[in-house]
Image (cartoon, rainbow, N blue to C red):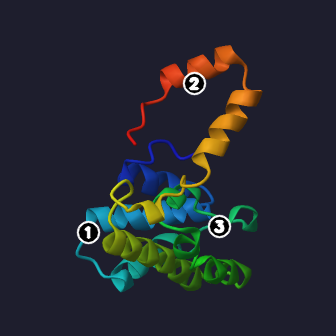
């Protein structure tokens, strides 16, 4: 929807022209954090409030930040979503940004405490206990030619 999401300037310019989703706002907060790692959450909030004041408010239809599920448990990255929802209801950018930054802070705290994805212990591995049943189910219902194609194109896992 927004062109190159890895380019903070392009993301900022495009978002200024269209209604931003909650995910877009979160990505913008991450982009600011990447540009200014020393910035406090209050400074990021002030920048984002100035940037989005007067712009259309996000929709209620998609109050998620799906790409964060790989970074932290849902209870961390979704912590600010009720605040975002209330901010949308009252059309208050400060409250919306507060919720976005709470989710960002929780995600960053989780990563700081637990390490990046792939460096965690088995307790945090979400595939524990479901990997074998999943393979059985896929093997039972997926045609052999699709199974071979999927195995060929997916990276090999190291146990």
Instruction: Give yes or no for contact between labels 3 and 1 (Cβ–Cβ under 8 Å).
Output: no
x and y, in percent, of residue 143 in the image: 73, 19
Horizontal side of residue 58 vs 70, given as left or right: right
Q: Quadrant of residue 133?
A: top right
> How many residues crowd mark 2 within 10 Å: few (<14), some (14–19), many (20+)?
few
x and y, in percent, of residue 102 in the image: 49, 80
Residue 80 in sight in this render: yes
Could you tell which of marks 2 and 1 lies nearer the N-terminus?
1
Q: Quadrant of residue 59?
A: bottom right
x and y, in percent, of residue 155 in the image: 43, 31
x and y, in percent, of residue 141 in the image: 77, 29
In this picture, is 63 found above or below 86? above
Instruction: Give yes or no for contact between labels 2 and 1 (Cβ–Cβ under 8 Å).
Output: no
In this picture, is 142 found above or below 13? above
Most extreme residue toward the top is 145
Q: Secondary structure at mark 2?
A: helix
| Residue under pointer 1 | 36
> How many residues crowd mark 3 within 10 Å: few (<14), some (14–19), many (20+)?
some
Q: Residue at x 58, y 62 (%)?
A: 65
| Residue under pointer 3 | 56
Q: Residue at x 54, y 52 (%)?
A: 127
Could you tell which of marks 3 and 1 lies nearer the N-terminus?
1
Most extreme residue toward the left is 38
Q: Nearer the viewer, mark 3 or mark 2?
A: 2
**Which quarter of the rendering shows the N terminus?**
top right
Q: CA distance from mark 3 to mark 2?
A: 42 Å
Q: Nearer the viewer, residue 113 or 47?
A: 113
| Residue under pointer 2 | 150
Q: Residue at x 68, y 29 (%)?
A: 139
Q: CA distance from mark 3 to mark 1?
A: 26 Å
Q: Secondary structure at mark 3?
A: loop
Q: CA distance from mark 2 to mark 1?
A: 40 Å
């Amino acid at each position: 929807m927004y062109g190159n999401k890895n380019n903070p300037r392009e993301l900022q310019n495009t978002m200024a022209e269209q209604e931003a989703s909650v995910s877009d706002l979160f990505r913008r907060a991450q982009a600011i954090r990447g540009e200014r790692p020393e910035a406090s959450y209050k400074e990021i909030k002030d920048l984002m409030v100035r940037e989005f004041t007067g712009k259309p408010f996000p929709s209620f239809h998609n109050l998620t930040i799906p790409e964060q599920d790989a970074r932290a448990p849902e209870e961390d990255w979704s912590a600010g979503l009720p605040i975002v929802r209330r901010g949308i209801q009252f059309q208050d950018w400060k409250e919306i940004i507060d919720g976005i930054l709470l989710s960002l802070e929780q995600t960053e705290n989780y990563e700081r405490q637990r390490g990046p994805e792939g460096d965690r212990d088995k307790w945090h591995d979400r595939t524990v206990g479901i990997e074998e049943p999943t393979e059985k189910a896929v093997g039972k219902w997926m045609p052999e030619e699709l199974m071979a194609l999927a195995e060929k194109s997916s990276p090999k896992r190291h146990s």
